[in-house]
């Protein structure tokens, strides 16, 4: 390897390392901020340049565009493939906003098709499988969704009504406003369009037969990943209610850690050497026998933004309430013992095959004085019919259907809290035996 190639390889490795470091600190930035968006795009761009420097010796512009588009599509497709119900809910939001509710039954299928196609396009671009078709697919995606996001952004500005809160482009991994989504799409269109016009210069890495085999394997793998998430729960959880999250509410008297800290600085003079030096004096001062403060220099304040705690999620008052509108939110998230929440956002469509196991779990929880509630957004008469059908004895509380769909991706789904911390969650298909709950209690005393 020539010296130039060694330097190129080293620069590429440094850029990739810098990108991975940026990903590790991505949680510092709050969602729906321009800073987080530009950090994301900048991180992907740096990684793309690094990969191009390592794996390519020519056509750097094409390679950078290919890597950039591929990484972005893989990220966007993957976060949706591991959470197909999230895509389902987002499609329903779009159908409702445009008075196309008749398409709601097809939302889940459309969500899986879209995430599979998006992830497949990204993987094919990265590994140069059918580069002409995959670059065309990327362009079709961008030309299709960019006008939609522009419409949503303008519509919100003109009417003041928000048809869809966010595009769902990156699932729950990154929430963007409609304007941020449109700007992001315009930014991405540049390398996508360039890649499409240069597609004939990209040589496939596999023969036609192996390309077909690879495409089939990748497609089945992606669909299988989504199927697993549907039957169980998302294997990688980007939701705000993931395990380990501390649920808090200021209405419960719980303090939320500040996001900034002010540091105070002052200039001092060394009374022995005359050296001038600035010291931080927020909590301590330098040795007064050596350093004298310069009274003619004003103090300087510096406000530092602290890292936002990723595993703290704030709840509003009346997040969970009884049928009579009594607020249960604080009762649940401040309970120092274990709290079982059986989430059934739509009790009429909730699967009842494990109803007996759930009833047995409720009886066991009662024996140990653990709180056990059903959470739903359904009407009282539907709840009554469900209780009669399943012989459920636990109390049902009310919550917003969107929130319930976010708490756990299942209907029903079981969530266990202690001191407001999410200890565990399961799909209703996977309710474990009592022995596992006893072990869980022992491990979380």
Image: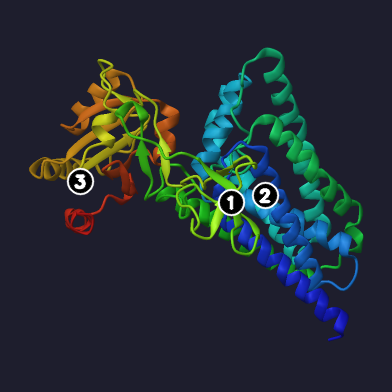
Residue 353 % position (x, y): 27, 42
**Circle 1/circle 2 CB separation < 8 Å:** yes
- In the image: residue 70, left or right of residue 391: right
Q: Which quadrant holds residue 418?
A: top left
Q: Residue at x 48, y 54 (%)?
A: 236
Q: Quadrant of the N terminus?
A: bottom right
Q: Quick check: can you spot residue 205?
A: no
Mark before the other along the chain sequence, 3 or 2: 2
Q: Nearer the viewer, mark 3 or mark 2?
A: 2
Crowd band around label 2 with a 10 angstrom C-alpha radius: few (<14), some (14–19), many (20+): some
Q: Residues within 10 Å of mark 1 (few under 14, many from 20)?
A: some
Disc sitting over residue 26 in the figure: 1
Please name the residue that numbered disc 3 is placed on.
357
Mark 3 in CB contact with mark 1 (< 8 angstroms):
no
The front one of 245 and 412 is 245
Q: CA distance from mark 3 to mark 1?
A: 41 Å
> Which label is found at residue 165?
none
Q: CA distance from mark 1 to mark 2?
A: 8 Å
Which tag is nearer the camera, tag 3 or tag 1?
A: 1
Q: Which type of secondary structure does the marked residue at label 3 adopt? A: helix
Residue 4 point in image, percent of width and height:
87, 79
Q: Which residue is mark 2?
A: 40
The image position of residue 257, as x and y in percent, is 42, 40
In primary-sequence order, the first of circles 3 and 1 is 1
């Amino acid at each position: 390897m020539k010296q130039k190639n060694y330097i190129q390889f080293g620069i590429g490795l440094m850029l990739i390392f810098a990108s991975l470091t940026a990903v590790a600190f991505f949680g510092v930035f709050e969602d729906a901020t321009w800073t987080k968006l530009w950090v994301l795009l900048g991180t992907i761009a740096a990684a793309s340049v690094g990969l191009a420097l390592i794996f390519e010796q020519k056509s750097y512009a094409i390679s950078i565009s290919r890597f950039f588009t591929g990484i972005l599509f893989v990220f966007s497709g993957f976060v949706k493939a591991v959470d197909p119900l999230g895509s389902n809910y987002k499609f329903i939001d779009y159908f409702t906003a445009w008075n196309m509710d008749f398409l709601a039954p097809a939302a889940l299928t459309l969500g899986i098709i879209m995430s599979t196609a998006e992830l497949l396009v990204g993987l094919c671009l990265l590994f140069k499988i059918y580069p002409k078709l995959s670059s065309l697919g990327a362009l079709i995606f961008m030309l299709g969704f960019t006008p939609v996001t522009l419409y949503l952004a303008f519509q919100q500005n003109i009417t003041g009504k928000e048809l869809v809160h966010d595009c769902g482009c990156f699932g729950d991994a990154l929430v963007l406003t409609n304007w941020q989504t449109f700007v992001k799409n315009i930014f991405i269109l540049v390398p996508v369009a360039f890649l499409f016009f240069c597609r004939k210069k990209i040589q496939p890495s596999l023969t036609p037969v192996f390309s077909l085999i690879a495409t089939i394997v990748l497609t089945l793998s992606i669909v299988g990943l989504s199927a697993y998430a549907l039957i169980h729960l998302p294997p990688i959880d980007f939701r705000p209610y993931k395990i380990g999250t501390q649920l808090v509410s200021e209405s419960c008297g719980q303090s939320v850690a500040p996001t900034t800290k002010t540091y105070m600085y002052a200039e001092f003079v060394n009374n022995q050497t005359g050296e001038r030096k600035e010291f931080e004096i927020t909590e301590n001062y330098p040795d007064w026998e050596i350093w004298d403060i310069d009274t003619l220099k004003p103090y300087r304040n510096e406000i530092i933004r602290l890292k936002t705690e990723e595993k703290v999620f704030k709840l509003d008052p009346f997040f969970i309430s009884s049928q009579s509108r009594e607020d249960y939110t604080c009762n649940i998230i401040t309970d120092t013992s274990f709290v079982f929440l059986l989430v059934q956002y739509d009790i009429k469509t909730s699967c009842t095959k494990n109803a007996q196991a759930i009833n047995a779990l409720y009886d066991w929880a009662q024996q140990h004085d653990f709180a056990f509630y059903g959470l739903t957004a359904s009407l009282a008469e539907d709840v009554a019919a469900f209780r009669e059908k399943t012989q459920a004895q636990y109390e049902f509380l009310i919550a917003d259907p969107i929130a319930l769909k976010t708490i756990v991706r299942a209907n029903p789904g079981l969530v266990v809290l202690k001191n407001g911390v999410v200890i565990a969650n399961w799909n209703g298909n996977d309710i474990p035996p009592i022995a596992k709950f006893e072990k869980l209690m022992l491990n979380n005393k």
